[in-house]
Image (spheres, helix red, strand yellow):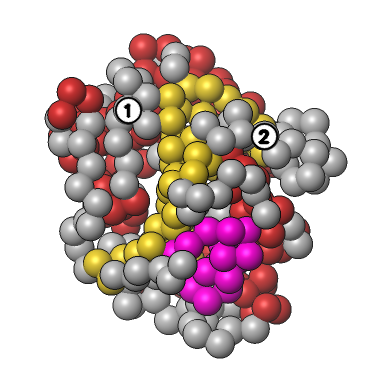
Amino acid sequence: MRSFIILILGGCMVCSSGAHGAPINELVTQAMQGDHRDPANVERDRYRHPLQTLRFLGLRSDMTAVEIWPGEGWYTEILAPVMRPEGIYYAAGFAMTASRTPQWREDMQIAYMNKLGKQPDVYDHVVSTELSYPERTTIAPPGTADIVLTFRNVHNWMQGHYAPGMFRAFYRALKPGGILGLVEHRAKPGATMKTMIESGYVTERHIIDLARQAGFELEAKSEINANPEDTKDYPEGVWTLPPTLRLCAEMDEGPDQKRCDRKYRAIGESDRMTLRFRKPVTSTTAK
């Protein structure tokens, strides 16, 4: 089957509705404005465009949704309250006992679980699962998820040389007709594998190939999270930009560091692709 690809500049092709017919934009906006959110996370809304992104990816509040590697919980702060009334929200975090899991990821996962425990009125319906290829790949019961969401993760899997296995895990978790929604730092076309792994920027072509090899069809792409100011040629790769600002962090405090900080904050966060894939309706097993 040939994929139907539409370029969306700001809106969404999939008109999603939430609980009892309420527009998803109302539910997401309420979550974004909630007092449970970390102020530092709120500051990043202008770079990550969560409302437009989730609308485009096709989220509904009555879905069974899986978020891949939620990290410190940036999107969890939004997804958990949106999904709480009617949906099911799986947070497929770092595996605590897997051989691939470095200590910093274990520490981040512990902090994430503590975050959930401190506010049960917001997070009591979050279902925590583990994802580490190949040890832990059942992110939700197979064939039950309506949507799998992953934000800025593919470069990590490429560095570990297990990206194809992760896409197969998503495919297996999704229902036929289910959605894979993906946001990733975008490399310049033609970037080599070495450049992608070292810089953290990935070409659209490579991600589309990974998804298709797992059985997905590309349905649409959006420029919601594009940043034309990002030149993608920094000494510390994508981590030169906010929020990491690695190059500036390695400098001694003083005027040069302040200039560095101003320079990269003015660029903003990375240029990102936003892609929506679909598991074919006729599919019953992962490839």
Q: Residue at x 55, y 49 (%)?
A: 283
User: According to the image, label 1 marks what residue?
Assistant: 62
Question: Which residue type carries mark 2?
Answer: Thr
- SS majority, magenta: helix
Relative image position of residue 251 (x, y in whole percent): 57, 66
Please tell me in which quadrant of the rendered image residue 123 appears. Answer: top left
Query: Which residues make up the magenta segment?
Result: 204-218
Q: Is residue 140 above or below residue 265?
A: above
Q: Residue at x 24, y 67 (%)?
A: 8
Membership of 207 in magenta stretch: yes
Kindly give the residue lying farthest to the bottom in the view shown: 190
User: According to the image, label 2 marks what residue?
Assistant: 138
Q: In terms of depth relative to the viewer, which is nearer, 76 or 258?
A: 76
Q: Residue at x 36, y 41 (%)?
A: 41
Visible residue check, residue 121: yes
Question: Which residue type carries mark 1?
Answer: Asp
Q: Secondary structure at mark 1?
A: loop
Relative image position of residue 45 (x, y in whole percent): 29, 48
Q: Is residue 75 above or below residue 212?
A: above
Visible residue check, residue 266: no
Q: Residue at x 50, y 39 (%)?
A: 175
- Could you tell me which quadrant the C terminus lies in? bottom right
Q: Residues within 10 Å of mark 2 (few under 14, many from 20)?
A: some
Alpha carbons under labels 2 and 1: distance apart = 21 Å
Relative image position of residue 98 (x, y in whole percent): 80, 37
